[in-house]
Image (cartoon, helix red, strand yellow):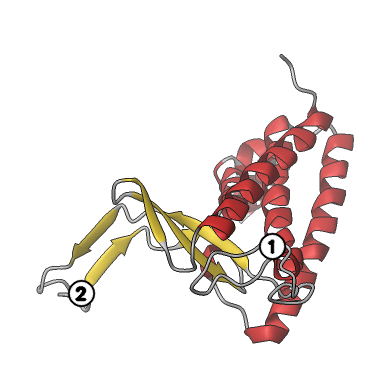
Amino acid sequence: MQISKQNIPFIIVPLILVFDQVLKIWVKTNMVLGESSPVLGDWFILHFTENYGMAFGIQFAGELGKIILSIFRIGAVVFIVWYLHRLIQKNSTKLLIASISLILAGAIGNIIDSAFYGMIFSDSYYRTAEFLPEGGGYARFLHGKVVDMLYFPIIDTTLPDWFPLKGGERFIFFKPVFNIADAAITTGAMMLIFFHKRLFPQHSKKQEKDTNKA
């Protein structure tokens, strides 16, 4: 079945959001903060953590930074929606529209946590969170924490003593804990990087001309 370009965002964005939010809500209401549950042995683990910051648990300048980041995310979503509309109008490639749609879905997914989770859930310290608790949530609007849970410690070892600087220390790859929204943003961004010449042929040709002139 052929999918039209204008329908791509309406397929990708809701699909990512459903999977992202269902998993986050399940983790929030079934696991205690810091709890881990193996999925595929020691290689894929559900590890419940929360953060105030950016993708992959990166922190950002305390409470003021949290507000700034939330406003920036909302502004970014508005811009991406406008940009997607322009891409469809200009008859851009499906791959480019899909890439931007993934980034949009991920941004919205984490905004939902940040904007509303503090209002609709109790905290997750030493207990599973309660949905719509009687005394109210753990934070006000835009002060919620982003739920992360996907952990892939594919390599977990101790470096040999002779290894420069880090000898004898524990080494884990891949260490960041993230969520489906983070994965969507990263996938969309990597598609833009890897397929840059295909997605932006005019820009690539201009760069080649400028390089040849130099």
For mark 1, give the secondary structure: helix
Q: Is 16 drawn above or below residue 156 in the view shown?
A: above
Quadrant of res 79: bottom right
Task: Name the one closer to the observer, 22 or 80.
Answer: 22
**Secondary element type, mark 2:** loop
Image quarter hosting the N terminus = top right
Tag in front: 1 or 2: 1
Residue at position x 52%, y 69% in the image = 127
| Residue 169, position as x, y percentages in the image | 20, 74
Name above or below for residue 25 compared with residue 157. Answer: above
What amino acid is found at the position of numbered circle 2 in the picture? Answer: Glu
Relative depth, front residue between 121 and 65: 121
When asked about the image quadrant of residue 86, the answer is top right
Q: Which residue lies at the image location 74% right of the left edge and 75% below the top edge?
A: 135
Closer to the chain start, of discs 1 and 2, is 1
Mark 1 lies on residue: 113
Q: CA distance from mark 1 to mark 2?
A: 35 Å
Residue tagged by mark 2?
169
114 up-or-down from 9: above or below: below
Residue 194 - label: none
Horizontal side of residue 143 vs 27, given as left or right: right
User: Can the viewer see residue 201 in this picture?
Assistant: no
Quadrant housing the C terminus: bottom right
The image position of residue 172, as x and y in percent, is 30, 63
Name the foreground residue: 42 vs 69: 42
For badge 1, the amino acid type reads Asp
Please say whether residue 193 is visible from this viewpoint.
yes
Q: Is residue 184 left or right of residue 105?
A: left
Instruction: Pinpoint residue 69: horizontal percent, then vertical percent.
Output: 72, 73
